[in-house]
Structures are given as C-alpha cells and as structure tokens.
Amino acid sequence: MRFAPSPAEILHDFRADENLLVDARGVCMNFKMPTERIDNLKEYAIKFLKRKIKYKKFEVLKDVDFRVPRGESLALIGRNGAGKSTLLKIISGIIRPTSGIVLTKGNVVPLLKLGAGFDYNASGKENIFLNGAMMGFSHREMQQKYDSIVEFSELAEFINAPLKTYSSGMVSRLGFAIAVDVNPDLMLVDEVLGVGDIPFRKKCADKIEELKKTGTTFIVVSHSMSQIMTLCQKGIYLENGMIKMQGDIKTVANAYLADCKALEEAAAKKS
Ligand SMILES: Nc1ncnc2c1ncn2[C@@H]1O[C@H](COP(=O)(O)OP(=O)(O)O)[C@@H](O)[C@H]1O
Ligand SMILES: [Mg+2]
C-alpha cells in the first residue's frame, strides 16, 4: 500500500530535483459569486453588514496536477474561461490557490498583463526603475540594464514623457522590454506575444527564441497555435478548470482543435 506523500516530502523531493522547475499538486481554486443581483453600493453595504449576501461556490480550477522540468516549455490550451489565466496567476504567486500546492524554482518572471504595474503619471524612464524595483532589482542593477531596455523598446525619443501620453502599443513594448531583460529560469506568458506592430512582433519572437536557447523555460497561453507549436514541447488542455488531457504538444493541440471543429459544426447545424 502506498500513502500519498506529505507536503514536507513533496517539498524535499522538489528541492532535491535540480531539473524540476514547477511541481503543482491538487490545485483547486474557488471564487465566491453572489447569487443575487445587487444594484448599488448602499444595498451591498447593508446586505454585507447584515451578512445577507448569499454566495455560490464557483470552482475555477479542480485538482490540477502537473510538473515542468527545465527546458520543457508548456502551453496551456483551452476555451475562454477554462482557467488558464487563473492558473498562471497561481504559478506566479499573485494569487494563492484555495487548496493544493504549487512549488517553483529559480527566477520566475510573469508576463501576464503588460504595463499592469505601471504608473501612468510617471515617465517611461521612471517606470523602468519602478518596475525593476518591483522585480527585486536595485537601482544600480537597473542602471546597468537601462540602455538595453530603452533600445529594445524603441522608445528613446519618448522615454522622458509621461506614460499617459503613450499609445497602448508603446506601453506594451516598454513592458515587454523590461520583462525580457532578466533572463529568467521560468517565464509565464499570458496572451501578450502579439503586442505592437509587425516588426516589433518579429523582434519579440526572436527575443523569445533567444531566451529559449539560453535556457529559459516557458509556460504560455496563446491563441496562436503555430507559436505554441514552435515554442512548447508539452501541452495541457484545460476544460472547465479540469485537465482534460496533457502530454506531447502535438497530440494535445490536435485534440483541442478537433473539439473546436466539432463545436463549430454543431453550431452550424443548429442555425
Ligand atoms: N477574481 C475572480 N472572481 C471571480 N471569478 C473569477 C475571477 N477571476 C476569474 N474568474 C472566473 O474564472 C473563470 C476562469 O477565468 P480565467 O482563468 O481568466 O480563464 P481563461 O484565462 O482560460 O479564459 C472564468 O469563469 C472567470 O469568470
Ligand atoms: Mg485568460
């Protein structure tokens, strides 16, 4: 008879395995959703104080289990609302799962919502230092990175202007340039690889390829199947918060595409 390993044993084994970057076990995430409609803040406050708001448990992730060895990039595939972004946020440590464990090793950089941590009243330059500080870099370390970040972003002319004067493409470029300048062990990417115009996208794709060559492992959510296929070796197909399939990227992507096609055909028959 085998007993399930204790959290201490899982942690011990994870630390002992230098090659394992992520170990996720039994990850569940529940959100509470109000079951009735509340029209205004006053009504909400009164009901909240009287503890009269009724919630329904909403399971976004159910018993998600997977491991990511170094050098085996992983794609999270699934329809809108399947739980991909929630899972990436849990891996990055932005939110904690309701239950289960996610262990990560090394330098983990999330590229989830470009520019989310920016101060729009501050200049591009100030935001580079601000963002660096949030990632744990000293002012001096950021001074060393500064030139290459500005060069990559192609924003030298605008770098002293406040961010609120930038277009959304420019903000994304700055966010991407800061994030990719760190050479992380693990990079978490949520649908941000299509930022900027076509030449900039090409540059991003080249940079990602370069990071991959120097040893960065990726966990990626993207609607571009061709991008997923070139970047990732493994795939997880999420459906309603559960792993429907995981394994070799080709097999998983094909299963997902076949399901999409079947859905489309069913919809076409109805109309
Ligand atoms: N903070 C939250 N509170 C309540 N529900 C949430 C929250 N974040 C996400 N959800 C819900 O969780 C489900 C999965 O969302 P998400 O992880 O963003 O899916 P995906 O990225 O696969 O499209 C969705 O139904 C979404 O509405
Ligand atoms: Mg998402």
Image: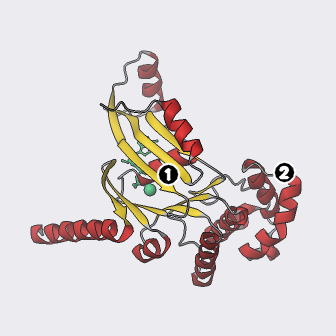
Q: Amino acid at mark 2?
A: Ser
How many residues crowd around disc 2 within 10 Å: few (fewer than 14), some, or many (20 or more)?
few
Residue 138's mark?
A: 2
- Judging by the rendered image, the residue that carries numbered circle 1 is 88
- Disc with the residue nearer the chain's start (2 vs 1): 1
- Tell me whether the residue at label 2 lies in contact with that at label 1, contact meaning CB atoms closer than 8 angstroms: no
Residue 22, can we see it? yes
Task: Locate residue 163: give its quadrant.
Answer: bottom right
Tell me what residue is drawn at x 77 percent, y 69 percent: 149
Above or below 62: residue 171: below
Residue 235's mark?
A: none
- Residue 154 position, x and y percent, is 74, 77
Pick the residue in front: 3 or 90: 3
Mark 1 Cβ and ligand 1 under 8 Å apart: yes
Pick the residue in front: 144 or 169: 144
Q: Quadrant of the N terminus?
A: top left
Secondary structure, mark 1, is: helix
Q: Amino acid at mark 1?
A: Leu
Left/right of residue 14 with respect to residue 176 in the rendered view? left
Residue 96, can we see it? no
- Residue 48 position, x and y percent, is 44, 21
Number of numbered discs overlaid on the protein picture: 2
Tell me what residue is drawn at x 44 percent, y 27 percent: 44
Task: Locate residue 261: give its quadrant.
Answer: bottom left
Left/right of residue 130 with respect to residue 190 in the rendered view? right
Pick the residue in front: 155 or 218: 218
Task: Locate residue 37: give its quadrant.
Answer: top left
Tell me what residue is drawn at x 56 percent, y 52 percent: 21
